[in-house]
Amino acid sequence: MKATTSNSNQEEFVAQKGIKTRRKYKESANEFKWLHSQCISNQILLFDKEKLENSTLKSKSRISKECLKEYRLVLKDGTPLLPFQSSQYVVDYANSRLFYFNIMHQGKLTHFEFSINSSSSTLEGTTTGISNVPWEGELTNMGLCVGKNKMFVVYGRLSDSGAVCNSGCIYVYDLVRKAWLIPKVKGNQLTSIIKRHSVTCCVFQDQKTEVDYLYVFGGERDAVPEKELMNINNIVEFYKINWSKEKFEMELEHTLINKRDLYHDKVSYVPYIYSYAFQLNRTNNIFVLGGKRHSHSPYESKTIHYFNYR
């Protein structure tokens, strides 16, 4: 009887262990499927800088496909780097570099820098420099732009220890010194800075005064008071940039412009989230185009794909 009981207990133990193993395997498989569903291709399409400068732009005709080149994102050993759908990148064409944020690598979100070489079909990613970020936790949905040998990371959605909040911070990466800095922000309207994510931003130089600015358009918020109708922000901000090259410091003077009510018939156009903005050559205009459509704005019934901010 004792032997039979012992065998029965042993069989039950093995069965329970098998159930736990299958359950654990299923959970791991589901997690892998979820991770796989979040990934996108490691192929990226960029302008070929040399061909672009020597091509049809001189004849004022359309940019040809020859000015574009497809690359694959890889590690040094050739292993493909697969960005998430929520990963973001910004290109520094002046210095032939690509910066990609929040790619899953070795079990955590990692930031990569790539050197762009038009003679190669692959871009090898490194984590030096850019990965030493000044913020705590995971920052996603941020505004990204490059100008004056600086990369700006503007606002975003910050996750830390399970808590998620909107960010009102600006971080700057010096592309020459390869180091991060947190600029000092001043202005009479600092209390009016609205923490949000998915903004569109652009580095701009006034053609008359040669003063540099950081412009920030639109954006959205997660936690919106119930009394507000929507979380889309019809806002234009600009920061006057004061450089201090000797001390490696930067000061930003903040100014906010409130646009008209989103529900007004003659509302000013709100840029889509994740739009691309750039200063039109030798003018005081900023061209904004592309992005992701606002799903709840009544103004989206009209077909507008870009706008020119003067």
Image: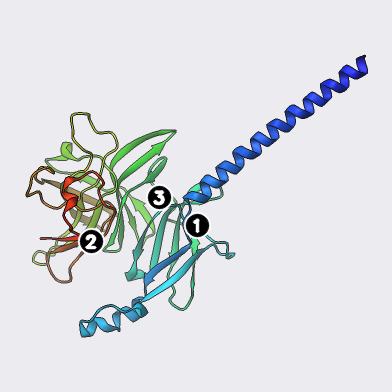
Local SS, label 2: strand
Say if residue 67 shows up in the picture: yes
Image quadrant in which the C terminus is located:
bottom left
- Marks 3 and 2, how far apart at CA: 20 Å
Q: Tell me if residue 96 can be seen.
A: no
Image coords of residue 162 (percent x, y): 43, 33
Instruction: Please state which amino acid type lies under the numbered disc 1.
Output: Leu
Query: Which residue corresponds to mark 3?
Result: 86
- Foreground residue, 247 or 19? 19
In this picture, is 289 found above or below 28? below
Residue 168 higher or lower than 47, as above or below: above
User: Would residue 108 be found to the left or right of residue 276 on screen?
Assistant: right
Q: In the rendered view, would you say 28 is above or below 201?
A: above
The answer to whether residue 2 is left or right of residue 26 is right
- Residue 82: mark in rendering: 1
- Ranked by sequence position, the earlier of labels 1 and 2 is 1
Residue identified by numbered label 2:
289
Q: Give the residue drawn at x 19%, y 54%.
A: 215
Asked whether disc 1 touches disc 3, contact meaning CB atoms under 8 Å apart, the reply is no
Q: Amino acid at mark 2?
A: Leu
Q: Position of residue 71 (x, y in %)?
A: 46, 69
Q: Residue at x 35, y 69 (%)?
A: 95
Q: Give the amino acid type for the residue marked by disc 3 in the picture.
A: Ser
**Whole-percent x, y for residue 229 in the image:** 18, 35
Coloring applied to the structure = rainbow
- Marked residue nearer the N-terminal end (3 or 2): 3
Q: Callout 3: helix, strand or loop?
A: loop
